[in-house]
Image (tube, helix red, strand yellow):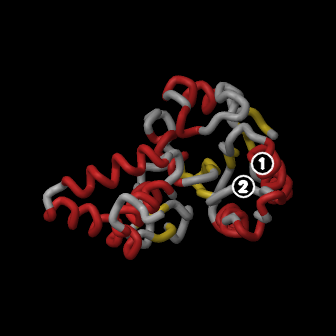
Amino acid sequence: MAGSQAPSIERLIDCFNRLPGIGKKTAQRLAYYVLSMPEEDALKFASAITDAHKKIHRCKKCCNLTDDELCPICRNAKRDESIICVVEEPKDVVALEKTQEYSALYHVLHGVISPLNGIGPDQLTIRELVKRVNDDNVKEVIMATNATAEGETTAVYISRLLKPLGVKVTRLAYGIPVGGDLEYADEVTLVRALEGRSEI
């Protein structure tokens, strides 16, 4: 039986449906909303996506996403360069920055060690982190990976690599619920987690 919608609408719905957290009904609503937009707005929306894909890449220093050689945080001379906070994803940097309590640097791993999903240390930016600690005057590395089995495994793995370099390795305190993600934690919880971090 033929579909009740035009193939181009079906493709648009399918594209939205592939986004995380977007079900079929929400994808359909988004597709029809995009179709109802003035053409100029729809073209701006499409252009923003293609523009971001072309221009956004990893920061040369911290591996966060940027459209410049260095991200705004790494370019900021007021940041404390002796401390690096290690996070799983770029969205975790956004979550921690919202607290306005952390004024040092970050390092984005772009995932966690997960053998079940075929992700080992080589697929992450761990090598770049070790090089930063070796080359720069880093005194403390805060492990801010999520409180999941994979996040814990990654934190322990990295701490074992960094300890011989004479750097202090700490872990966020458990103000963040086990199994929870940084992006969903409120600012107060994140501040308490930062303040109550402990050495691994």
Residue type highlighted by circle 1: Glu
| Res. 61 mark | none
Q: Amino acid at mark 2?
A: Val
Crowding around mark 2 (Cα neighbors within 10 Å: few <14, some 14 to 19, many 20+) is many
Is residue 93 visible in the rendered image? The answer is no
Query: Disc 2 or 1, which lies upstream in sequence?
Result: 2
* Rendered view: 198 above or below 122: above
Which residue, given by chain and number where applicable, does mark 1 sit on? 150
Where is residue 71 shown, x and y percent of the image? 43, 62
Residue 64 image point, x, y percent: 51, 60
Left or right, 141 with reference to 57? right
Residue nearer the viewer, 46 or 194: 46
Count the numbered circles shown. Answer: 2
Question: In the structure shown, which secondary structural element does the residue marked by tag 2 occupy?
Answer: loop
In the figure, is residue 5 to the left or right of 139? Answer: left
Numbered label attached to residue 112: 2
Disc 1 crowd, CA 10 A, few/some/many (<14, 14-19, 20+): some
